[in-house]
Image (cartoon, coloured by chain):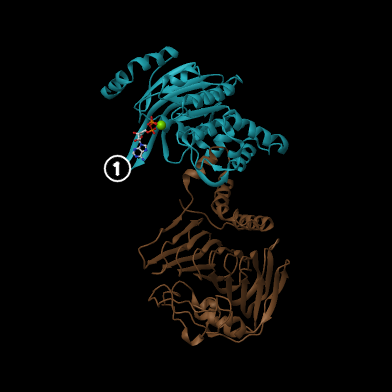
Amino acid sequence: MTATVDNFSSALELEHVESHLHPEPSYDVEAHPKPTGLEEIWRFTPLKRLRGLLDGPVSEAKLKLAEELPEGASLSTISREEAKALGGIAPLDRLAALAVENAPDAMLLNIDGELDAPVRLNWSGEAADQIVWGHTVVKLAPFAKATVLLDHIGSATYGSTVTYLVGDGAQLTVISLADWEDDAVHAVQNGVSVGRDAQVRFFEFTLGGDLVRSSTNVDYRGTGGSAELFGVYFADAGQHLEHRQFVDHTAPKTRSNVVYKGALQGQDAHTVWIGNVLIRKVAEGIETFEQNDNLVLTDGAKADSVPNLEIETGEIAGAGHASTTGRFDDEHLFYLQSRGIEETEARRLVVHGFFNDIIRRIGVADLQERLTSAIEDELATVVGRLES
Amino acid sequence: MSTLEIKNLHVSVETEDGEKEILRGVDLTINSGEVHAIMGPNGSGKSTLAYSIAGHPKYQITEGEVLLDGEDILELSVDERARAGLFLAMQYPVEVPGVSVANFLRTAKTAVDGEAPKLRTWVKDVNAALERVTLDPSFAQRSVNEGFSGGEKKRHEIAQLELLNPKFAVLDETDSGLDIDALRVVSDGVNRYTAQGDRGVLLITHYTRILNYIKPDYVHVFVAGRLAESGGQELAEQLEAEGYDKYVKAAAAL
Ligand SMILES: Nc1ncnc2c1ncn2[C@@H]1O[C@H](COP(=O)(O)OP(=O)(O)OP(=O)(O)O)[C@@H](O)[C@H]1O
Ligand SMILES: [Mg+2]
C-alpha cells in the first residue's frame, strides 16, 4: 500500500470477515473468476444479456461527456495506477475489476470547499452495441460540500467503476441517473468511503436500459459517518433493473439508512433489490435501517427483494430492515375515487405519492421536475392491467 | 330538488365461511333540504350502508336499488357516483402517503366540477376551508390524512365536504372521537353546508350529543341490517334514555 497523507489509501485495519455477503475486494481481474450464474452475487442477473461484458472485450470507446463545474470543482484525466493509488473500495466483482482494467484512463473529479451549484456530469452513449469501460474517482476534501449529478442517456454496453472518497466532515449528495434508451446495458460499481463525521446522501434513479446492474458499496473510514442511500426504479416490460447495496459498518457510531422504491409494469419486467449490511465487531453504537418497497402495477412483472443483516457485535444502537412488495392498495384508490377522481388518475396520484417521498429529498428543482415527468411518461404507457 | 332513494337494499360481504348478509332490506328516501340521522348499535351495518352507497368494492349488492334523481347509481363506478353528487365522510378516513392535501383537493375539485378551479381563488378557498375547521393551512402540504390525529382526519373530511359541495353527504360517525370544541367545529361545517337549503345529509351516529348541534328532520333506528323505526327528534331522546335494547331484542325475535 502506498503511503500518502490522506486517510483513504491507508489500508483499513480490519480483521478478515468470512461474510457470505460479498467476496474479497480486489483490483485483480483474475481474483474474480467468470461467473456461472450460480454465485450468490450473480444469481439474479441474466448473464447472457450482459452482451459479453464478462469476457472483458477491449475497447477504447468513451461516453460523450458534457460537464458543468462550479468553482471549487475540477476535472482531470489520470492514469489507472494514479486512480488506484487514491484508494477507496476496490472492485467487489468481475465487472468492476474489468472496468478499472479496461478503461483507457480514469477521470478525477476533485472538490474543495463548499460548492454553490451542483456539479453535472452528463454522459451519453452512441449505440447499444458499443462497448465502453469507465473509471471515475470523486474526491471531496475534508469539510467540502457538494452535490454531484451523474446523468446517463443514450445507449451503450457500459461497465463502470465509480469511487467516492469523502473526506472528514465533508457533505456529499450524489444523484446518479440511469435514463438510458431501452437497449442499453449498464453495470456499475459505486464504492463510497465515508470519512469521519462525513455525510453522504446517494440517490439512484433507474428508469431506462435493457439491463442495469448497480452495486453500491459503502465503508466508513472514521467514526460518526453517515450514509443514506435512496433509490427509485421503474421497470417496463422486459427490463431487468438490479440494485445491490453493501453497507460495511467498519467504524463505531456510524449510521446508514437505505430506502429503495420501485414500480414494475409489463410482461417480464424484473427488478432485484439486495440490501446487505454488515456490522463489524469494531462498529459499536451504529445505527442502520434498510427498506425496499415495490409496487407491482400489472401482471407478468416480478420483484425480488432480499435484505441481509449480519451482526458481529451486540453493542448497536439500532438495526432493522423492511421489505414490501404489493399491488395497489384498494383503500387508497377507493378514498381518492370517492372524491370523484377517476381510477387512472387515482393510480397516478398513488404512484407519484409512492416515489415522492424520495424525489422530494433531492433538492435540485429541475431534476425533481424531470423525474416526476419521467415517471408520468412511464405511467402513460401502462401495458396491461392487474387481474385483481 | 334532488332525491336519494334507497330501496330494499340487501348487501353481503365475503367472509371466510362464505357470504354473510349484512344489510337485509333497507328502505330510505332523502330529499334535498333534509337531514336524516341514523342511530344504531355497533355492528348493525351502518358503515356497510354508507360504503355501499359510495360503491366500496368489498360490499356486494345482492338486491335492491339506490337511485339518485331516479338514476340507479349502483351501475356507476365509485368516482362516477362522487361526480354525480355523492359524498362519504368516512368513519376511518384513509391515509394516502405521498399525495399532498393540496394536490388531492385540486384534483378532486377538478374532477367533480369538470374543470380546474380558478388558480387565484382556489388557494384562498382551500386555506379558508381549512381554517374554518381549525386546521392550520400547513396541512395543505402534508400527505392526505397521514399522521393526522383522529379529530384532524374528521375535520379534514368536513373541509372536503365544504369544498366539493355535493348534493348528498353521508357522514359516517363524523362525531366520534371528537372533543367538545372539535364537535362544534364539525357541526358548524355541516350546518353551513345544509344552510344552502338544497343539500341532503345522512348523518350516522351513536350519540345524541351531536344532535344538540345538528338538528335532524328525521331520526331512524338501525338494527340488524335494517331500519327498525323512524321518527323525529323525540326518537333520539327516547334512545338516549332507553338505549337500543328493545329494538335489538325485537330484531333477535324475528
Ligand atoms: N369481512 C367481514 N367478515 C365478517 N364480518 C364482517 C366483515 N365485514 C363486515 N362484517 C360485519 O358486518 C357487520 C356490520 O359492520 P358495520 O361496519 O357496517 O357496522 P357499524 O354499524 O358501522 O358498526 P360501528 O358502530 O361499530 O361502526 C359487523 O358485524 C361486522 O363484523
Ligand atoms: Mg361503522
* Secondary structure category for the residue under label 1: loop
Residue drawn at x 44%, y 18% as measured from the top left = B219
Q: Is mark 1 within 8 Å of ligand 1?
A: no
Residue drawn at x 53%, y 56% as measured from the top left = A384
Residue nearest the viewer, comparing A188 with B116: A188
Quadrant field for ligand 2: top left
> In the current view of this chain or complex, which residue is farthest to the front?
A5
Count of marks overlaid on the render = 1
Residue A17 drawn above or below residue A353: below
Looking at the rendered structure, the kind of residue marked 1 is Asp
Residue nearest the viewer, comparing A219 with B41: A219
Q: Quadrant of residue B81?
A: top right
Residue A14 drawn above or below residue B37: below
Residue A108 vs residue A28: left or right?
Answer: right
Residue drawn at x 52%, y 79% as measured from the top left = A10
Q: Colour of chain B?
A: cyan
> In the current view of this chain or complex, which residue is farthest to the left?
B253
Specify whether residue B63 is in view: no
Mark 1 packing: few (<14 Cα in 10 Å), some, or many (20+)? few
Q: State the residue position of label 1.
A: B17
Q: Position of residue A208 (x, y in %)?
A: 60, 66
Residue B25 vs residue B189: left or right?
Answer: left
Specify whether residue B210 is in view: yes
Q: Quadrant of residue A149?
A: bottom right
Residue B43 vs residue B6: left or right?
Answer: left
Q: What is the letter of the brown chain?
A: A
Q: Position of residue A212 (x, y in %)?
A: 55, 70
Instruction: Give the chain letter at badge 1.
Output: B
Q: Position of residue B115 (x, y in %)?
A: 68, 38
Q: Position of residue B201 (x, y in %)?
A: 52, 24
Residue A281 vs residue A105: left or right?
Answer: left
Q: Quadrant of residue B193?
A: top right
